[in-house]
Image (cartoon, helix red, strand yellow):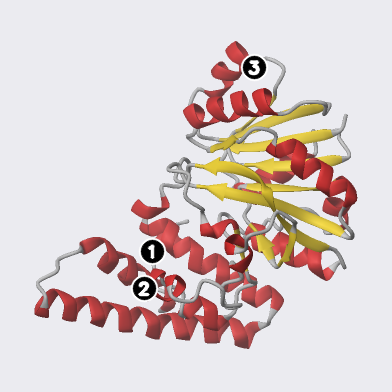
Amino acid sequence: MDLSIIIVNWNSVEFLRKCLASVKAGTHGINYEIIVIDSASFDGCEEMLRKYYPEVVFIQSQENVGFARANNIAFEKSRASKLLFLNPDTEIDDSAINIIYDYLQKLPKAGALGCKLLNSDRSIQTSCIQSFPTILNQVLDSDYLRARSLKSSLWGVAPLYEDKSEPSVVDAISGACIMMERNTFEQIKKFSEEYFMYTEDIDLCYKVKQAGYLNYYIPDASIVHHGGGSSQEAKSNFAVVMMRDSMYKFFMKTKGHNYAWCYRIFMLFSALLRLFTLWISSVVFNRQNRNPIHKWQAVLQWALNKNELIKNY
């Protein structure tokens, strides 16, 4: 067995079916297996797999254990020397898996490899690579600033806009598509399970780099990542809060207690500033947009350690 493809499903059965069809159509000359674990969504994916893809290994988790732990559970069932962690809401472009697989075998100190992610309209998804998080790039993160400083090291997305086909060494790649050697994954102790959702991919890439390997972005390989197939993050304050809470855990783990609490304090002031700006916009320009207000209210509550979404979870 050359490659184990591991997919965590949660309420994404229609995306999953298209994903598997694209893997089968575009992957050739590799002896691969596919392992799908459903994290207690019970969305009919077992029946779909039994009907259309009976060769897929299926695991039904009785509880929603989160992305990191679900991948680790599925990994225990895998047999191949190389691993591909793939989101269910992706579709493989042509021979993308073959391209990444070939590079994994020949790039020096290859750790985690990712590819170009495309939105449904085939525009570039800038989240496919990034710099390791700092307080500065988290507080300043906004569409406005990113659009005006695309090649800044603050974001780490410059390779997306370079006119070259060679792989680039990057800090972190998206968890939507990560390929790596089995031995490397075992050496870094797999995915860190303290994250329920978000930041587990950054944590993985951080551990890969700490172990002496390099993370690569492969621009020749592309995958459509529809996004929102599982989390519907744009609509969920829970997801907004979980992103900040996972980042807080990452800072606590990698930079210590004081740095993590500084991040929380800076996010508090950032939320206050953005809420004030939104209030001014609504008063002066009569712009009523409830979604950003609710988002930053949720962040403010989290920063004050009063967010019931996290407490209830």
How far is mark 1 from mark 2, CA to CA?
A: 8 Å
Residue drawn at (86%, 33%), measured in percent from left and top?
2
Of 139 and 163, which appears nearest the observer? 163
Q: Amino acid at mark 2?
A: Gln
Image disc number at residue 53: 3
Q: Residues within 10 Å of mark 2 (few under 14, many from 20)?
A: some
Which sits earlier in the primary sequence, circle 1 or circle 2?
2
Whichever of labels 3 and 1 marks the residue nearer the N terminus, that label is 3
- The circle drawn on residue 301 is 2
Q: CA distance from mark 3 to mark 1?
A: 41 Å
Name the residue carrying label 1: 308
Q: Of tags 3 and 1, which is closer to the observer?
A: 3
Q: Nearer the viewer, mark 2 or mark 3?
A: 3
Quadrant hosting residue 128: bottom right
Marks 2 and 3, Cα distance to the nearest angstrom?
Answer: 45 Å
Left/right of residue 128 with respect to residue 84 in the rendered view: left
Residue at the location (82% across, 26% down)? 29
Q: Position of residue 241 (x, y in %)?
A: 44, 64
Question: Residue flagged by tag 1: what amino acid is it?
Answer: Glu
